[in-house]
Amino acid sequence: MTAAVRALWYKEMREGRWKFAIAALVLIALGAGVPLTYELFGGVLGQLLEDTSIPQFLKELLPPDLLQMGTFLWSNWHAKNLYQTVVIVAIIFGSSAVAGEFARGSAQYLFSRPVSRGTVVLVKTAVDLIWIAAAALLGTLALAVTARIAHGYTVPWTFYAGLVPIMAGGAFVYGLALVVSTRLDDPVRAGVAAALVAAIFSIPSFLPTWRSLSVYVQMTSPALFRNETFPWLPVLVMSALAAGLVASAAAALEKRDIA
């Protein structure tokens, strides 16, 4: 690694630390909060099941193990709070990666350094994904510690393995935002545009026939929790798509005229 690339790594780590700190604090708070809502949720659900005004067929639609601690934690963490927050954080990080340099007026100086534009994109991507992964891990650890203290429940290995598909999908969303960021000079506009594109990819989630093709459904890896089957194929596909998007962003930046 050359001195210029090391300097770039240091710059990105230094500039991204505050975004990481905020993301980590949010995920830690969410992770710690999930086990603490278990008893409240159980009480509300119990009242609903005892309510005679609710048709029996609606009650039967609820999963029979919904009140089991593991199911509750997974449903409210991996299948809800964690993946949703990672998607939002990935959009924020990705949309500001390149557009932020133009907004701050530092683009000309950055791209005049003895480092190729492609290398800049790769370093920015690597640093941002490291920060996002670290925040997701800290949030999961907060959930595990709180579940142990509050309920004596030890989360299984699947809760940590589930971070891999979460990050593979997060990398894909980051790649979408990064592509937009190389084409716009305003990180806010880039973020809005990236969010709209990311929302389009959520459409298969609402179509029963196409749900398995949804990035967001695959991020929650239901088979990993239910059967302890690691989703190798979805992870590889999402990772490959993310790599393609990062390569596309690097190619677009190489062609861009920076006065």
Image: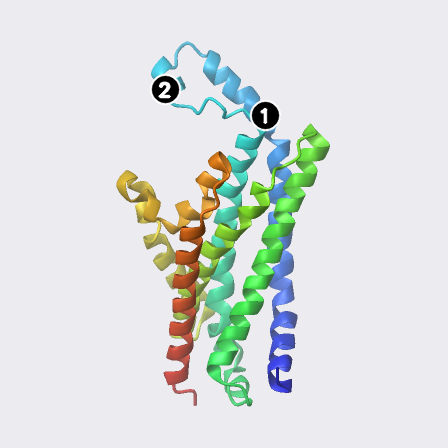
Q: Residues within 10 Å of mark 2 (few under 14, many from 20)?
A: few
Pick whichever of labels 2 and 1 is earlier in the sequence: 1
* Foreground residue among 219 and 46: 219
Task: Quadrant for the N terminus, please.
Answer: bottom right
Three-letter code for the amino acid on which mark 2 is drawn: Leu
Name the foreground residue: 19 vs 140.
Answer: 140
Identity, as a three-letter code, of the amino acid under mark 1: Leu
For the C terminus, give its image quadrant: bottom left
> Which residue shows up at 41% across the image and 47% down it?
218
Left or right: 185 in relation to 6 = left
* Residue 173, quarter of picture: bottom left
| Element assignment for label 1 | helix
Q: Which mark is residue 40?
A: 1
Numbered disc 2: secondary structure: helix
Residue 35: x %, y % from top left: 62, 34
Query: Does residue 130 appear left or right of residue 222 in this picture?
Result: right
Asked whether the residues under the numbered discs 2 and 1 touch, taking CB atoms below 8 Å apart as contact, a structural biologist would say: no
Query: Which mark identifies residue 58?
Result: 2
Where 49 sits versus 22, above or below? above
Q: Is residue 225 above or below residue 177?
A: above
